[in-house]
Image (cartoon, helix red, strand yellow):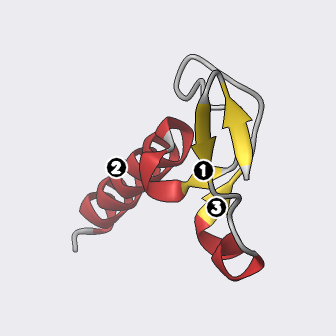
Amino acid sequence: MTERKGEVRPTPSLEDRGQTVVHKGTRDCPILEPHSRQSCGIVQARERRQAEADAAERARRGG
């Protein structure tokens, strides 16, 4: 369990590791503890930029 200011949350299991991220806090995602990819602003921003780049590349190639 991890504890933070009276809040207790279960520690992610090893099975969840592929869907869990850990990083330094940033403006995009200030969460310092392990958390899900779906709740991570950094992952969301990276995936959004990649989708935009892929769409631009497809448009450039005429597809």
- Residue 53 picture location, percent across and down: 41, 51
- Find out whether the residues at labels 3 and 1 contact each other: C-beta distance under 8 Å: yes
Residue drawn where x is 59% and y is 68% of the image: 19
Image label count: 3
Q: Earlier in the sequence, mark 3 or mark 1?
A: 3
Crowding near the residue tagged with mark 2, few <14, some 14–19, many ≥20 C-alpha atoms within 10 Å: few
Establish if 4 lies above or below 10.
above
Between 22 and 15, the one lying in front of the other is 15
Question: In the displayed structure, does residue 35 sit left or right of residue 2?
Answer: left
> Label 3 amino acid?
Thr
Per the image, label 3 sits on a secondary structure element best described as strand
- Residue 13 picture location, percent across and down: 71, 73
Residue 4 sits in quarter? top right
Let me know if residue 33 appears in the view: no
Residue 36 sits in quarter? bottom right
> Label 1 amino acid?
His
Which residue matches tag 1? 35
- Find out whether the residues at labels 2 and 3 contact each other: C-beta distance under 8 Å: no
* Residue closest to the far bottom: 15
- Residue 6 picture location, percent across and down: 61, 27
Tell me the CA gap for discs 3 and 1. Answer: 5 Å
Which residue matches tag 2? 52
Which residue matches tag 3? 20
Residue drawn where x is 55% and y is 29% of the image: 29
Q: Earlier in the sequence, mark 2 or mark 1?
A: 1
Q: Which of marks 2 and 3 is nearer the N terminus?
A: 3
Tell me the CA gap for discs 2 and 3. Answer: 24 Å
> Label 2 amino acid?
Glu
Establish if 27 lies above or below 16.
above
